[in-house]
Image (cartoon, grey):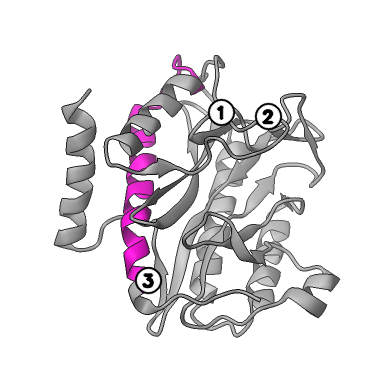
Amino acid sequence: MFSLKTEKDIWKMRKAGLLTWSAHELVRKIIRPGMTTRELDAEVEKLFDRNFAVGMFKGVPGRVPFPAVTCISINDQVVHGIPGDRVIQDGDLVSVDLGCKIDGWCGDSAYTSLVGSVSEKAKKLVQTTRETLWLAIERLKTARYWSEVARDMEKYVRERGFSVVESFVGHGIGRTMHEEPQVPNFIYESFLREEDFQIRPGLVIAIEPMVNEGGKRIKQLSDFWTITTADGKLSAHEEHTVGMLKTGPLVLTGPPETEDERKMVDQFFERYEKNK
């Protein structure tokens, strides 16, 4: 069971979504070979702090509480990479997962950057992952149940010669970062039998395909957080927070679409630059 949001609630979530989008826009502007993942994380934290938002990842409980506002995963790292002294290199795939809470509502999104000159296989992997996310968003317009969407996502990835990570799934989101329902990017029997859910107005979910170049198996590193591919091959991660209105899906973590939204984003960056 999970709660649906009102249309008013969903529009309130747009502010957190726009700040989340702005954080990714900042990353896209400043990411470069030679900078450390810690430096990248610090700039996102400044953007959040100066806009009175809480970075939702920092302090997440675990054997070691997560120490940063972003997860930065490079090349064979799938998710939950801890920012630190690692230097970003030309040719790296850098997946940045981040989320914030502002005015009581959350936004969550991930984006994989291609840094410098990357291989054609890497480009195809990232393109496939991004297209899989947008395929899912488009299917929300016509699907009755999430299983229909997940089946198409899995099929799309496999037809392009890649594999879907099955150990992590998307999730509901609202006043907290992780809510019900579970939102898989593939089909499994117990989901069809017990966990499938209707696509209807009020649903707000974070859709986040993670796609591997090789096999779907993963492993956790000794830092208790970082997840890598078991075979050492590349992985990519894309995510948006999406709310279902009566008129269809609204990508809450997408770019500004109205003059008021553009002004809000401008204010986010003005606050960030003012205190630099």
For the residues marked 1 and 3, what is the alpha-carbon distance in whole angstroms? 30 Å
Return the disc, 1 or 3, that comes first in the chain's sequence. 3
Mark seen at residue 42? none
Instruction: Answer whether residue 13 is magenta in the image.
Output: yes
Tell me the amino acid under the disc marked 1.
Answer: Pro
Tell me the amino acid under the disc marked 3.
Answer: Asp
Return the disc, 2 or 3, that comes first in the chain's sequence. 3
Location of residue 186 by image quarter = bottom right
> Residue at left 74%, top 74%?
195
Find residue 211 and report its horizontal and vertical position in percent.
67, 48
Q: Is residue 250 left or right of residue 56?
A: left
Q: SS class of the residue under badge 2?
A: loop
Find residue 36 and report its horizontal and vertical position in percent.
48, 17
Q: Are marks 1 and 2 in contact (CB under 8 Å)?
A: yes
Residue 195 versus residue 86 in the image, above or below: below
**Could you say which is closer to the camera, residue 171 or residue 177?**
177
What residue is disc 1 on? 67
Mark seen at residue 64? 2
Residue 125 versus residue 228 in the image, above or below: below
Question: What residue span does the magenta drawing correspond to?
Answer: 9-37
Find residue 43 and report its horizontal and vertical position in percent.
36, 27
Structural crowding at the residue carrying mark 3, measured as other residues with C-alpha within 10 Å and reported as few (<14), some (14–19) or many (≥20): some
Structural crowding at the residue carrying mark 1, measured as other residues with C-alpha within 10 Å and reported as few (<14), some (14–19) or many (≥20): some
Q: SS class of the residue under badge 3?
A: helix
Tell me the amino acid under the disc marked 2.
Answer: Val
Quadrant of the frame with the N terminus: bottom right
For the residues marked 2 and 3, what is the alpha-carbon distance in whole angstroms? 33 Å
Mark seen at residue 9? 3
Residue 263 versus residue 93 in the image, above or below: below
Q: Is residue 171 left or right of residue 196?
A: left
Instruction: Answer whether residue 65 is magenta in the image.
Output: no
Quadrant of the frame with the C terminus: top left
